[in-house]
Each structure stands twice: as C-alpha cells, then as structure tokens.
Image (cartoon, rainbow, N blue to C red):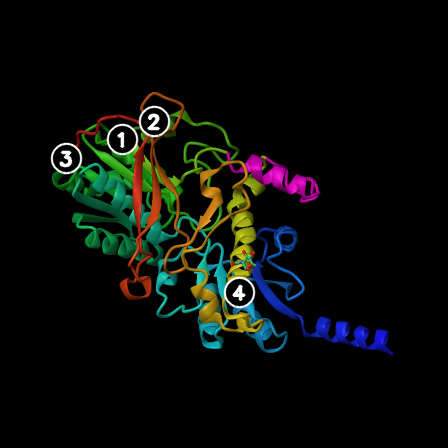
Amino acid sequence: MRVLLIFFLLLSKQCLAVKVKVAHIGAVGAMKNSEKILQLSKEQLIQEGVLGDDFQIEILNQMGCGESYEGVAVGADMYHVQGVRAFIGPYCNAELDAVAKMATFWNIPIVGYMASSNSFADKSVFKTLARVSLRTTNSLAEAAAALIKHYGWNKVAIATNTGAVAFERVQSFEEVFHQRGINVVRKIMLDEYTNAKAIMNSGLLQELENSARIVVCAFSSTRDMTKEFMQAVTLSGMNNANYAWILPWLQIETKDNAPWLGDDGEYQQNVKDHFANAFLIDDVNGFDNTLVTPFKERLESNGYSTDDLEMGLYCSDFQKNIYGYIHLYDALRLYALAVRATMNETGDENSYLNGKEVWNHMRRISFPGLVSNAGVTSGTVMMDDIAERAPVYAAFYVPPNSDNVRKVCELEPVLLTNCDGTKTGNGCYELQITDLSTRILAIS
Ligand SMILES: *[C@@H]1O[C@H](CO)[C@@H](O)[C@H](O)[C@H]1NC(C)=O
C-alpha cells in the first residue's frame, strides 16, 4: 500500500514537470542540419543541469521563409494548435517581423538567430525578442562610428544605392553617426545594380572628391556592389592614401567569401588590388577560418562526424552556413538560461510563460557559446541591455601589394552601468578599441 502511494506520488510529480514546447522556424532550403544542431545544444543544456526534470523542452521544427510568408501561418498554428510557448527564428527578416509581433502579443519569448534588420532593435515594438546574430545593421553602424572617432575623423561621406535594403541601412548609419557627433557632409546614391563603368560615368565620384576623404559604404548587396565601387574608385585614381574607404561588411544571412575570392574560392589579385587602402569592418573572425575548427571539434566530441552532417568541411555550403549553425545553437542556450534564471528568481516553475520576464533575463547575460572553447573571441555570447548581441568586431586593413588582410584593431563592447536601454533605445554599451597595428593614419 505504502509502496503504491509513493509510486503514485512519483508519477504525479512526473506529470507536473514542466515540458515547454519550443518552436524553431527555419528556412526552406537553408541549413538542413538545424535539427541536429538544436539537439546538440539541448543535450549540452541537460548535461549542465540548465534543463532538468523541473524544466524540460520539446523542440518542434518547421520551415518558413519561402515565397509566401508561410512562416507567419506556421507560427500562429504552432502557438494555437500545437501549444508552443517559445520561438527560435524565423530565419528571415520578413517573417521574424510578423512572428515577433505576435509573440509580443502572446507575451512569450522569441530569439532571432539570423535576421539582421535594424528595426528589431526597437524593443517598444518587439517586447519579447532577443537576438544572438552578429553583424546586425545597427551594431555595424556603431562599430563604424567608433572607428571613425578613434582615428579622429569627424567628417564623412556615405556612398549607397537606391532600393529599400540600402535605405534602411543608411538610415541606421545616419542615426548612429548623428548620435556620436559625426558629420555626414555628403551622400551619393548609385543605382542598385550598377557597374564600375556606370559609376565612373555618373560623376558621383567627383562629388565625393570635392567634399570628403573618409567614405563609408552601405550598399544593399555588399560584396557585389563593393567590388564594382572599389574598381571605379581605383580607375578614377582615388584609391590612395589620401582617402579612407570604410566598408562595414553588411551581409544578409550567409557568410560571403572575401570579394577577391571568386565563386570557386580562387584568388583574384586584380580584384584584391582595388581593395588596397580600404578598411573592412566585420566579425572579429570574419576573414579567417578560426570558427571552423572548433565547430568541427565540438561536433565530433559529441559523437557527430561532419560526414553525418553531410557537410564537407571546407565546401561552400558549410562555409556559408557556419554562422547560422553557431547562432542557432546559441539561441536555444540563451532561451534556456534565461528561463532557468527566471525560475531561480521567482521560484515559480510556470515563469517560462511570462515572456517579458524571461526577456528581462536575456539582458546583460554572458555565456560561452558553441565555439568559445578554443578561445575564439566571438565565441562568447554577450547580450546588451536590450537583449541584442553585443558584438566583437574588428577592422581589417587591406595593405597594397600584399596577399593578407591585416587586422588593425578590435572593437570590444563594454556595458555601461546606470543605463536603461528601454529608455535610451540603444544597447547601453561602448566599443573599446584595441590597436593591433601602429600604422599612422594622417588623413583628415
Ligand atoms: C539557478 O540556480 C542554481 C542553483 O542555485 C544555480 O546553480 C544556477 O547557476 C542558476 N542558474 C541560473 C541560470 O541563474
């Protein structure tokens, strides 16, 4: 009798244990190993005791981001029919926008892992959204501003192109430059799909020549447009030490090859020459492959071979999605750590249902991400005061007559105390710059 009672007690405790359904909305045709990466992340969280009997999760994977905004319908169905109470993704900007607004309305947490659009930083709209993606537009704008101030340049021109994507980017850059006291003296607007020759014939480079020496580029298609633009600049005799061409490496989703690598990875010296004297701002590991090895080791130490994952290690597919996989892993981690912290604080095992409260615990949190073991700087995930990733960037200088890209400085975020990002509208951090190269910059 007594044994039976204990048995029933145990059974009922088991039934009461919280099992949260977490949805991942990916993208049709992208990152086909997402489920495995999420599983790996979940196993790690169980090992560490972040997940446990009192807080279990079930991951439901669905696809979105195709041609008809299906992710929005999927999101609504997952919440209402399947009982999902947290989201990771959607992958793309358009669907994250819709699902994150619904999540605000439902008051459940949502973590973006790829979408880079600036609008998501507005937490008066997206009240329960956190993002672990690097290279968001606003953080690259902050990095460009910090670099410009660091070198004492206060007047800049912006080169951009027509179209909505570039428009949003430039808006973000102008806003940040204004806040940081950087004067935009000129803005030139190229056609969206133009080429070097047309740029040279447009007379717009002469406008730049007459007004500025520091030029910040923000195009819709960074790699392709920058190639054309820098070729035009070079052929016009303006690529020399009198100018600084600042190229924040704005990318939409996947990791691009360096512009001087062709589609098959072949090195193109003639293209590289056009980038001499330019500054690229990117993720601190952006121009090397330091992320690849620790990622592979991590998978292998957990019993996955990279063959299992059907990704040839150095093939372009893997290269392209490496940020996606790392961010996906880290997104689930961020969610689980925040729910655990909320449960710890409130003592309420249903606190995962309070999206705003969970979101609050995603602010200012730091944790080792997927690739942090190998001492890779960008492996540590640091969230800012509005639960956006506080990124570690670097500026890379392309020396003339050299094969290598030289890292000239690193920009590391330092969180400010006594700052409330929900009031200031920014992440409450400053970028601290460490010089790695003593090249003297005498442009003014
Ligand atoms: C929650 O509390 C446990 C036990 O005190 C602690 O070990 C753990 O680090 C806490 N977790 C978080 C995410 O705050």
Residue 34 % position (x, y): 61, 53
- Distance of label 3 from label 2 (alpha carbons): 23 Å
Q: CA distance from mark 4 to mark 3?
A: 54 Å
Q: Residue 144 location, x and y as percent?
A: 28, 44
Instruction: Give the residue number, with chain letter if any, for mark 3.
Output: 444
The residue furthest front is 2
Element type at mark 3: loop
Q: In front: mark 3 or mark 1?
A: 3
The amino acid type, in three-letter code, at marker 4 is: Asn
Please indicate whether residue 367 sits to the left or right of residue 40 in the image. left
Mark 1, secondary structure of its residue: helix
Q: Secondary structure at mark 4?
A: helix
The disc placed on residue 234 is 1
- The magenta segment is 290-313
Whether residue 40 is situated above or below residue 436 in the rendered picture: below
The numbered mark, 3 or 1, whose residue comes first in the sequence reads 1
Point 22% across, 26% down: residue: 440
Q: Within the magenta stretch, is there residue 293?
A: yes
**Amino acid type at image mark 1:** Thr
| Image position, residue 160 (x, y; %) | 28, 48
